[in-house]
Amino acid sequence: MPRDPLIGLVGKPSAGKSSTLNSLTDASSKVGNFPFTTIDPQRAIGYLQIDCACTRYGLTDKCKPNYGSCDNGRRSVPIELLDVAGLVPGAHEGKGLGNKFLDDLRHADALIHVVDASGTTDAEGKVTRGYDPSVDIAWLRSEIVAWIRGNLMTKWGSIKRRHIAVKATAVETLQNQFSGYGSTSAVVARTLDKLGLKEPLEEWSDETIDRVVNAFTDEKFPTVIALNKIDHPDADKNIAKIAKQQDPNSIVLCSAISEIFLRKMAKQGYIRYTEGSEFVDTREDLIADGDPDGGGLKELDEKNRNRIENLKDMVLYRFGSTGVVHVLTKAAEILGLVPVFPVRNIATFGAGGVGEGTGSNKGVFRDCVLVKKGSTVGDVARKVMGDAPIAYIEGAGGLRVAEDQLVAVGKNDILSFKVGK
């Protein structure tokens, strides 16, 4: 199935970007038929947790995804991640891996900026103490804005002349310039609509251009701020400061290294732990709760027992979880992603997933695709079926739905595509 969109992870060296990427892609308990894979050295598959459609119909025991997994109605859907390397001050001037960083960045639909909330690494990722991580957030944005503005201004005179000569609209002219950043005419149109500019493009001042570039950056690169290393004693004051400066809805508090440790201990049979949960059970906990066998868990040594107790106090009980699962959830939220479930048989929600033989009957809701808010039934058809001719489309209940109808959670999100002319 298609795995658009693409989520880019950015962060300076030693901010915990690699740990965050590993914690997002280590889906050992949720792999189903789709194990973690590295597409290339910078791309991997993470797993977004959503509420599966199987819960609406009491079919949680029959839900068997082709990719990811479904655990009692909580579904893990594959989503592609991009490790964007080379983030250092001056990237737009080519410093560090600046040119590669920006070239990779343009492919992303949204960004997760992993920030070292502890303040124990400086702007270049070197060990220090008392660094202000809010600076990192500001200069990531300033690098992107400077990159886009610089490219635009170097040829602004020519852009204006062509704009007048061909009598283009502002959307058409800007899309010609912004297409290299993975933009679309819809993105440019939303940017200009939000600004409500009255003056024609050829009369824009430098200040207006700055406003346009900043608005375009917000629209094209929506960003989740993942404040990592929240278990460090210096993190509190930095988190408080950043929370006053940034939109609280864009911030997720997390401890990637804690998530990796808990998953490792669970995999080795020392604890019971569900990704995203605030609860961890050890053998001793289960015995105290009345299970004489301790759930069959192994005995912890004193070092790991103390580490888990500290992790419970400093992270799980205090913040509600390690936050890692919520990072991808927040990215999906700012993109307005809608899960859609293509099925072959709309009556049973099964009889084979997309691409399987019609005689297959191995489960329900085998496939799930993620589409952006505002997508139509026709958009989903093209995403799933490509250029195949569609005779008609059925929704839940066997009712035919028009291609121009919108999809949303609980509305036109279970679809069966009938091929033919």
Image: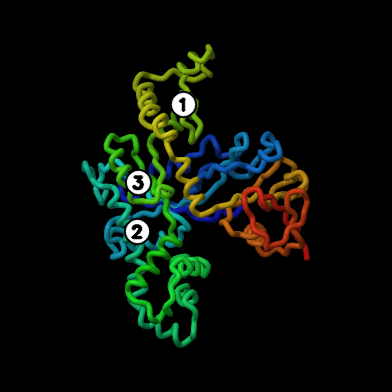
Q: Please say if 412 is above or below 240.
A: below
The numbered mark at residue 343 is: none
Residue at (35% x, 78% y) in the render: 155
- Residue on which disc 3 sits: 243
Q: Position of residue 417 (x, y in %)?
A: 72, 56
Label 2, label 3: how many angstroms apart (C-alpha)? Answer: 17 Å
Front residue of 251 and 19: 251
Quarter-wise, where is residue 14 in the image?
Answer: top left
Counting from the top left corner in percent of width and height, residue 206 is at: 32, 74
User: Spatial distance from mark 3 to mark 1, Cα to Cα?
Assistant: 28 Å
User: Is residue 120 found left or right of 259 in the rendered image?
Assistant: left
**Image quarter of the C terminus:** bottom right
Upstream in sequence: badge 1 or badge 2: 2
Name the residue beneath numbered marker 1: 280
Q: CA distance from mark 1 to mark 2?
A: 37 Å
Dot label at residue 141 = 2
Q: Position of residue 138 (x, y in %)?
A: 31, 55
Position of residue 230 measured from the top left corner of the image (x, y, whole percent)? 34, 38
Which amino acid, by three-letter code, is at mark 2? Arg
* Dot placed on the residue nearer the N-terminal end, 2 or 3: 2
